[in-house]
Image (spheres, rainbow, N blue to C red):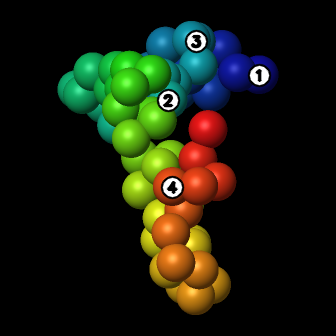
Amino acid sequence: MQAELAELLGGSEAAPAKGKPGRPAKKKRVMSDAARKKIADAQRKRWAKQKGEASADKKAK
């Protein structure tokens, strides 16, 4: 049935590609360990500030 439908519509049997046509797939971003640690430390500092603690440095590993 798929082949017949494709023939009627003038398309091919193959399933359509995912995503928008004419655009290449996005590459996955890679983050270094140092960048990940920097972001995590900053987030811990924000959480500590919100909780009312003096500093998150004493809890950071």
Which mark identifies residue 1?
1
Residue extending farthest left: 22
Residue 25: image location, x then y, percent: 35, 23
How much space separates mark 3 and mark 1, taking CA atoms? 10 Å
Q: Is residue 11 left or right of residue 24?
A: right
**Amino acid type shown at disc 4:** Asp
Identify the residue under disc 4: 57
Task: Answer whether labels 3 and 1 touch (C-beta < 8 Å).
Answer: no
Mark 4 crowd level (few <14, some 14–19, many ≥20, 10 Å Cα)? few
Residue 11 x/y as whole percent: 44, 21
Looking at the rendered structure, the secondary structure element under dot 4 is loop
- Gap in angstroms between the C-alphas marked 4 and 3: 60 Å
Give me the C-alpha separation between circle 1 and circle 2.
21 Å
| Amino acid type indicated by mark 2 | Lys
Which numbered disc, 3 or 1, marks the residue closer to the eye? 3
Amino acid carrying mark 3 in the image: Glu
Q: Going from the N terminus, do you reach mark 2 or mark 4 first? A: 2
